């Protein structure tokens, strides 16, 4: 084995690196690692972010709508004896007029309880029910994922087992496979879905939103991946980040910058997405 191969760990991953810098186990820490690949300088990191962002957005797909083989929630509640046919018909008429979800309509009519709707949703998605009321500490895991994404998907991380790296994410309505996959990739874990009462999830997210120590970054009105890459590099330099993880969540890019044990989340928006449809959480907003 040559001395070079014994000492060298890797070259700068950017093929256009001017110096083709090599990092060894004896080299002082410098540069930044993006998705497991080392970039020696800010300019190389910017090129890497731009290339990966273009690829991620090109491959991004929206969440699939409710699959046809899933039994409609109203029919599930009917089959369980929670409602009768006349009640279901009235609820469907009200739903057609209001546009609300059938579970919300039935609850407003006083025909079912929230627990009955939650149980039926769990059956619809073939997921277990997570009893939020019996687990008051479930909200302690909310910092694992960006609050804006949790609000958008009506989801809450309710348990994380460090030994097995299994994350349980509770959804209030629709289970998002896209969001679960993004959580898996960002946290290097296995993400499993469950269903919980919507009121419990909403309460936990509201508490997180009011946390004055919670700081996240929402960068809106991005016009190109080149612009997004420049902004990402600027933040990385401000935070003196040594690690970065970049992935897509539908039409949004999620960047997590890390230095030692401290991480900061950034959501980059291209066009209409979270900011125009959801109440903004405690984000440091950088409108470009």
Image: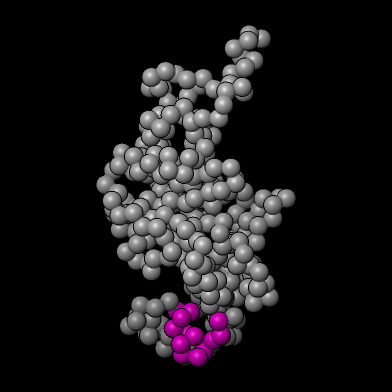
Residue 265 seen in this snapshot: yes
In the picture, the quarter occupied by the N terminus is top right
**In the rendered view, would you say 242 is above or below 10?**
below
Residue 21 lies in the magenta-colored region: no
Q: Which residues are magenta?
A: 102-114
- Magenta stretch, main secondary structure, is helix
- The quarter holding residue 101 reads bottom left
Q: Residue at x 44, y 61 (%)?
A: 148
Residue 105 lies in the magenta-colored region: yes
**In the rendered view, would you say 10 is above or below 142?**
above
Along the viewing direction, whichever of 123 and 135 lies nearer the viewer: 135
Q: Give x and y (percent) for residue 40.
A: 46, 27
Q: Residue at x 35, y 62 (%)?
A: 275
In the displayed image of the protein, which residue is found farthest to the right?
Answer: 163
Residue 154 seen in this snapshot: no
Along the viewing direction, whichever of 200 and 227 lies nearer the viewer: 227
Q: Give x and y (percent) for residue 169.
A: 58, 61
Q: Give x and y (percent) for residue 35.
A: 51, 37
Along the viewing direction, whichever of 23 and 56 lies nearer the viewer: 23
- The quarter holding residue 216 reads bottom left
């Amino acid at each position: 084995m040559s001395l070079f191969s014994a000492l060298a760990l890797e070259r700068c991953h950017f093929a256009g690196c001017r110096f083709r810098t090599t990092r060894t186990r004896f080299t002082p820490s410098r540069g930044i690692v993006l998705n497991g690949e080392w970039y020696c300088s800010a300019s190389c990191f910017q090129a890497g972010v731009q290339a990966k962002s273009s690829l991620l957005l090109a491959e991004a797909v929206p969440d699939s709508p409710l699959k046809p083989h899933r039994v409609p929630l109203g029919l599930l509640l009917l089959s369980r004896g929670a409602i009768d046919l006349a009640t279901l018909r009235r609820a469907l008429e009200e739903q057609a007029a209001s546009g609300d979800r059938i579970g919300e309509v039935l609850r407003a009519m006083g025909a079912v309880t929230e627990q009955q709707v939650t149980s039926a949703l769990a059956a619809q998605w073939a997921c277990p029910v997570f009893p939020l009321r019996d687990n008051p500490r479930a909200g302690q895991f909310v910092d694992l994922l960006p609050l804006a994404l949790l609000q958008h998907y009506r989801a809450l991380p309710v348990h994380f087992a460090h030994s097995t790296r299994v994350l349980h994410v509770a959804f209030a309505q629709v289970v998002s496979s896209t969001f679960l996959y993004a959580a898996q990739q960002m946290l290097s874990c296995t993400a499993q879905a469950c269903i919980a009462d919507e009121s419990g999830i909403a309460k936990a997210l509201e508490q997180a939103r009011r946390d004055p120590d919670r700081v996240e970054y929402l960068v809106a009105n991005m016009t190109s991946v080149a612009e997004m890459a420049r902004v990402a590099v600027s933040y990385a330099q401000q935070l003196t980040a040594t690690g970065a993880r970049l992935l897509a969540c539908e039409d949004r890019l999620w960047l997590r910058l890390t230095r030692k044990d401290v991480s900061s989340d950034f959501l980059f928006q291209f066009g209409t997405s979270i900011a125009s449809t959801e109440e903004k959480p405690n984000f440091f907003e950088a409108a470009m």
